[in-house]
Image (cartoon, coloured by chain):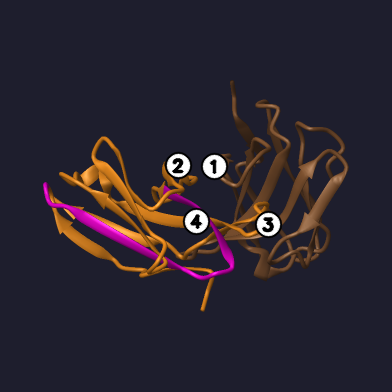
Chain colours: A orange, B brown
Amino acid sequence: QKEVEQNSGPLSVPEGAIASLNCTYSDRVSQSFFWYRQYSGKSPELIMSIYSNGDKEDGRFTAQLNKASQYVSLLIRDSQPSDSATYLCAAYNNAGNMLTFGGGTRLMVKP
Amino acid sequence: NAGVTQTPKFRILKIGQSMTLQCAQDMNHNYMYWYRQDPGMGLKLIYYSVGAGITDKGEVPNGYNVSRSTTEDFPLRLELAAPSQTSVYFCASRVEGGRGQPQHFGDGTRLSIL
């Protein structure tokens, strides 16, 4: 199993819907997780971080961490065409010095 | 603050040529990283540094070298460019301490080797 895995997509949702992005992880990563958004041709931009089991909300974004099932999710409410991008899930290794990225999920929000 | 600054933004090299990708940060971050991103893929770690004078290999270090003489700068050196090194290169930095510190990225260098 890869350390951090994501479905490559594309995930297509209509404008105004909830987009749900998922990420699974192995025992080789620590309990610090990050979601980055990357527009085509641009650098990754931090959206959310989550460290504790449960939900963390920030505006239209909610990150969910389930340590028992080893998955992290990002929910985007009221999706907008401007949310169309690739979303990268990342976690530090257990030593805490190297960040491992999933392959990213491409999200398309259709007007 | 400028954050993480990478130069150049674009470069075309011939096979066998050498070049240095520059990365500088003005946030006084001890930790700095170099990644490469191939089309449609995630980021792969090339090298990282936890402070001046200290560097270590990441997942894909072959064909690259780094140095860290100051806290601010972390250049990446390609000695003999190969077509397989065509990629987008990102530099990132973060503060020291704990496992929960996010990394902040530069705008990237798009490198083509022909």
Residue depicted at x 24% and y 48%: A76
Q: Pointer 3: what residue?
A: A95
Residue at (33% x, 63% y) in the render: A22
Q: Earlier in the sequence, mark 4 or mark 2?
A: 2
Check the residue under mark 1 and report the chain it is in: B
Quick check: do tags 4 and 1 share a chain? no
A20 inside magenta stretch:
yes
Label 2 with label 1: CB-CB less than 8 Å: yes
Residue bearing the label numbered 1: B102
Amino acid found under the numbered disc labelled 3: Ala
Residue B25 vs residue A96, the one in the foreground: A96
What is the crowding at mark 4: few (fewer than 14 residues within 10 Å), some, or many (at least 20)?
many
Q: Which residue is most to the bottom?
A: A1
- Please report, as a chain letter, where disc 4 is located: A
Q: Which residue carries the number 4 mark? A: A90
Separation of marks 4 and 1 at Cα, in angstroms: 10 Å
- Label 1, secondary structure: give it: loop
Q: CA distance from mark 4 to mark 2?
A: 10 Å
* Image position of A24 (left or right of A74): right
The lab-note entry on whether marks 4 and 2 share a chain reads yes
Report how far apart the C-alphas of labels 2 and 1 lie in the structure: 8 Å
Q: CA distance from mark 3 to mark 4?
A: 15 Å
